């Protein structure tokens, strides 16, 4: 029997600001069957694609990405906020609503022999995910696939990823933003 994952996602109105409907995955990962089903669905969709590593975007992408990596039997690459990784890193800037932020990976984490699946909890505008794709591709790695638990299609992030050659899969879609 298939679990209705959408029913396990809590919606919190007016967070972090008025007019936003925040899609909270905490209730999904607190449900053992729902969490397991989420990981199994993402892993099934991406098995047989010669994936060598899963990259997860800080912080909720770590939760799903690490579990998918274990399920696929591959390595995990943390994509972190600037200044959080020890050792030599490479970074990628991306635009925020009011300013710029940076994500980083270890400089030696990937090569042209790696095939990476990018995983995060939600795709909205796509800014962070696009920055992660550019960052990981700078290492020579191939990144052709991304998976998200939730897509907000009206915001357009999944389409922006497709425009740079990334196939996008999501398990749940919510109208609005």
Image (cartoon, rainbow, N blue to C red):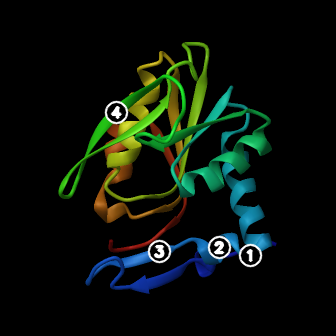
Label 4 environment density (alpha carbons within 10 Å; few <14, some 14–19, many ≥20): many
Relative to 22, say whether 88 is above or below: above
Q: Is residue 50 visible?
A: yes
Label 3 environment density (alpha carbons within 10 Å; few <14, some 14–19, many ≥20): many
Q: Which residue is mark 3?
A: 23
**Quadrant containing the C terminus in the rendered view:** bottom left
The image quarter in which residue 22 lies: bottom left
- At horizontal 52% and vertical 22% (from top left) the residue drawn is 142
Query: Looking at the image, is mark 1 or mark 4 nearer the viewer?
Result: 4
User: With 41 as the anchor, is 131 left or right in this view?
Assistant: left
Q: Which residue is mark 1?
A: 31
Q: Are marks 2 and 1 in contact (CB under 8 Å)?
A: yes
Secondary structure beneath label 1: loop
Q: Which residue is mark 2?
A: 28
Q: Which residue is mark 4?
A: 92
> Reading the chain from its start, which is encountered first: label 1 or label 4?
1
Residue closer to the observer: 155 or 100:
100
- At horizontal 61% and vertical 20% (from top left) the residue drawn is 114
Secondary structure beneath label 2: helix
> Reading the chain from its start, which is encountered first: label 1 or label 3?
3
């Amino acid at each position: 029997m298939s679990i209705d994952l959408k029913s396990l996602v809590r919606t919190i109105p007016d967070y972090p600001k008025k007019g936003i409907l925040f899609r909270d995955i905490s209730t999904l990962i607190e449900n053992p069957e729902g969490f397991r089903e989420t990981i199994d669905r993402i892993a099934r969709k991406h098995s047989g694609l010669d994936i060598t590593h899963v990259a997860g975007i800080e912080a909720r992408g770590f939760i799903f990405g690490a579990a998918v990596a274990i399920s696929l039997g591959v390595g995990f690459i943390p994509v972190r906020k600037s200044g959080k990784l020890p050792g030599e890193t490479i970074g990628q800037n991306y635009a925020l609503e009011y300013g710029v932020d940076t994500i980083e990976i270890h400089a030696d984490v990937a090569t042209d022999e790696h095939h990476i699946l990018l995983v995060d909890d939600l795709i909205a505008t796509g800014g962070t995910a696009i920055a992660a794709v550019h960052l990981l591709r700078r290492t020579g790695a191939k990144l052709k696939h991304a998976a998200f638990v939730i897509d907000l299609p009206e915001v357009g992030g999944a389409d922006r990823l497709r425009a740079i050659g990334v196939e996008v899969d999501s398990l749940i879609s919510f109208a609005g933003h």
